[in-house]
Image (cartoon, rainbow, N blue to C red):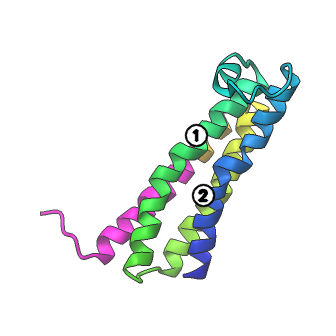
């Protein structure tokens, strides 16, 4: 169970960690505007715009990942398979963000799909462990 909780911890930290490239882009665009950062972010182009989109997507991905992990942990039903899915999710999300920053859109989409699939597999495993039937 410790491994899946570490993956969840990384997932929760990821939106903040991936904000660093966005903050750098904002700094390069005339200094970080702490009074109106969202307006400044909306005016970024190129690398900065991709960094902003990646930052926002990190929050969105967390919404799909966390419920399944929390359900498994709450039921004390974490399996080796679920841990593997969570680890793949973390790796795919890191790769996703790197591809976003360097503008490799096809591989970015593939890594997004992998991470989304892992979220679904974790949630599906929680559903199965709870004994839910689709009748």
Sort mark 2 into few (<14), some (14-19) or many (20+) by Cα contacts within 10 Å.
some
**Horizontal and vertical percent position of residue 34:** 74, 30
Residue at 46% across, 79% down: 78
Q: As displayed, is residue 95 above or below residue 79?
A: above
Residue at 50% across, 72% down: 82
**Horizontal and vertical percent position of residue 93:** 64, 51
Mark 1–mark 2 contact, CB under 8 Å?
A: no
Query: How far separated are the C-alphas under marks 1 and 2?
Result: 12 Å
Residue at 70% across, 43% down: 97
Q: Which mark lies nearer to you, 1 or 2?
A: 2
SS type, badge 2: helix
**Horizontal and vertical percent position of residue 81:** 51, 75
Along the polypeptide, which appears first: circle 1 or circle 2?
Answer: 2
- Which stretch is magenta? 112-135
**Horizontal and vertical percent position of residue 41:** 69, 24
Label the magenta part by its dominant secondary structure.
helix
Does 123 lie within the magenta span? yes
> On the image, numbered disc 2 is attached to which residue?
12
26 sits to left or right of 130? right
Residue at 69% across, 27% down: 37
Q: Nearer the viewer, residue 8 or 86?
A: 8
Q: Nearer the viewer, residue 108 or 43?
A: 43
- Disc on res. 57: 1
Q: Quadrant of residue 70?
A: bottom left
Does 39 lie within the magenta span? no
């Amino acid at each position: 169970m410790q491994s899946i909780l570490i993956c969840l911890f990384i997932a929760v930290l990821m939106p903040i960690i991936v904000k660093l490239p966005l903050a750098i882009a904002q700094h390069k665009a005339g200094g970080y505007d702490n009074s109106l950062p969202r307006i400044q972010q909306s005016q970024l182009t190129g690398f900065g715009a991709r960094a902003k989109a990646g930052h926002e997507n990190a929050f969105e991905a967390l919404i799909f990942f966390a419920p399944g992990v929390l359900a498994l942990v709450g039921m004390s039903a974490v399996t080796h398979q679920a841990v593997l899915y969570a680890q793949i999710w973390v790796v795919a999300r890191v790769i996703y963000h790197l591809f976003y920053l360097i503008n490799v859109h096809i591989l970015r989409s593939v890594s997004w799909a992998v991470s989304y699939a892992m979220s679904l597999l974790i949630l599906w495993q929680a559903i199965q462990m709870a004994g839910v039937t689709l009748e």
